[in-house]
Amino acid sequence: MSWLRPLGQTGLTVSALGLGTVKLGRNEGVKYPAQFTLPDDSAARSLLSLARELGINLIDTAPAYGSSEERLGELLAGHREDWIICTKVGEEFDAGQSRFDFTPEHTRYSVERSLARLRCDHLDVVLVHSDGNDMDIVTRMGTLEALADLKREGKLRSFGLSGKTVEGGLAALPQCDLLMVTYNLSERDQVPLLDACAAQGKGALIKKALASGHLDNLPKGDDGGDLDPVTASMELVFGHPGTTAAVIGTITPDHLTSNVEAARKALAD
Ligand SMILES: NC(=O)c1ccc[n+]([C@@H]2O[C@H](COP(=O)([O-])OP(=O)(O)OC[C@H]3O[C@@H](n4cnc5c(N)ncnc54)[C@H](OP(=O)(O)O)[C@@H]3O)[C@@H](O)[C@H]2O)c1
């Protein structure tokens, strides 16, 4: 399988690994195994350059990731065309607290604000950042309809749901270009969404492929346990034909390099 792949039928081409950027903008209220400080601008710039050198063109952010969008706006200035930018709508994070707003009005406001923060005239991918009430969002809130309008207006190229339930993902899929799906060695319950994306030719981005860094007690891979947890995770994620790309969050350059190596190997197998 190739490193660069079509994101469903969006016309966008993304690298098999994307860079998640929670850790560029927020270090409170997160579920990573260890405390960390946000990288300074010089470290963040080096990380982004390394990602590009390694062949990564997909970057994932969100309004709920603290200063991530604003920082990327500055850090990617002059290099916007090198990246496929994915951001989200629906979750806000202020003063250490998440709150959610899925109304069409807020959706439009949020997309306009992301355009300003990221300093661009269009967003490549916008995902609904679900609070878990996926069915409510899909059937009652009008969020996906608002995103469809914004797509028609040229403000975004594609949209989908980053949800928490299989039922919600399946309900959203007919209206969406892609889904963001949790899939790792200890959380496999969203596999039906990957199956559906594969069957319908839709894009599927994986979140938490490395179980948010909780690698110590992961169940063994399908090989029976000979592989290290990162390699086993990549084999799992890229072993499913529905996977377009895995968005992995890292601020450690060595991890970025070894993740790309493991992903390329899994794709070659
Ligand atoms: N609801 C949503 O839409 C949603 C929810 C969660 C995540 N996401 C997106 O998906 C991305 C990934 O999710 P995630 O960050 O929760 O989980 P993840 O990618 O599974 O794991 C990230 C954690 O794993 C560590 N890590 C990365 N590579 C490693 C390696 N080779 N060896 C050891 N540890 C390694 C990172 O630490 P280092 O920094 O030290 O490498 C980081 O703490 C996020 O950044 C975000 O963009 C979206």
Image: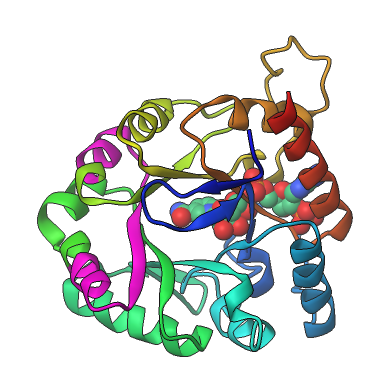
Q: Which residue, as the protein is rendered here, is positioned at the far left?
A: 140
Image coordinates for residue 246, horizontal then vertical, percent: 59, 45
Question: Does 117 sit above or below residue 122?
Answer: below
Query: Which residue is most to the top?
Result: 224
Which x, y percent locates residue 174? 20, 43
Considering depth in this image, is 5 or 164 the residue closer to the camera? 5
Measured from the top left, where is residue 124 in percent x and y? 44, 68
* Colour convention: rainbow
Q: Quadrant of residue 75?
A: bottom right
Side (left or right) of 2 relative to 110: right
* Spot occupied by residue 81 in the image (x, y as percentages of width and height): 58, 77
- Looking at the image, residue 17 lies above or below residue 20: above
- Nearest the viewer among 117 and 211 is 117
* 148 in magenta: yes
Query: How many numbered marks, from 0 up?
Result: 0
Instruction: Kindly tell me whether residue 33 is visible in this rendering.
Output: no
Q: Quadrant of the C terminus?
A: top right
Q: Nearer the viewer, residue 106 or 131?
A: 106
Q: Residue 27's image quarter?
A: bottom right
Residue at image position (59%, 80%) is 80
Please indicate whether residue 175 sits to the left or right of residue 200 in the image. left
Direction from residue 190 to residue 219 in the image, left or right:
right
Inspect this view and state whether residue 267 appears: yes
For the N terminus, the image quarter is: top right
Who's the residue at 77% across and 30% down the image?
231
89 or 12, which is in the foreground? 12
Relative to residue 43, is residue 2 depicted above or below? above
Task: Identify the residue shown where x is 43% and y is 27%.
Answer: 191
Q: Is residue 225 left or right of residue 70?
A: right
Q: Which residues are magenta?
A: 146-172
Q: Residue at x 37, y 55 (%)?
A: 10
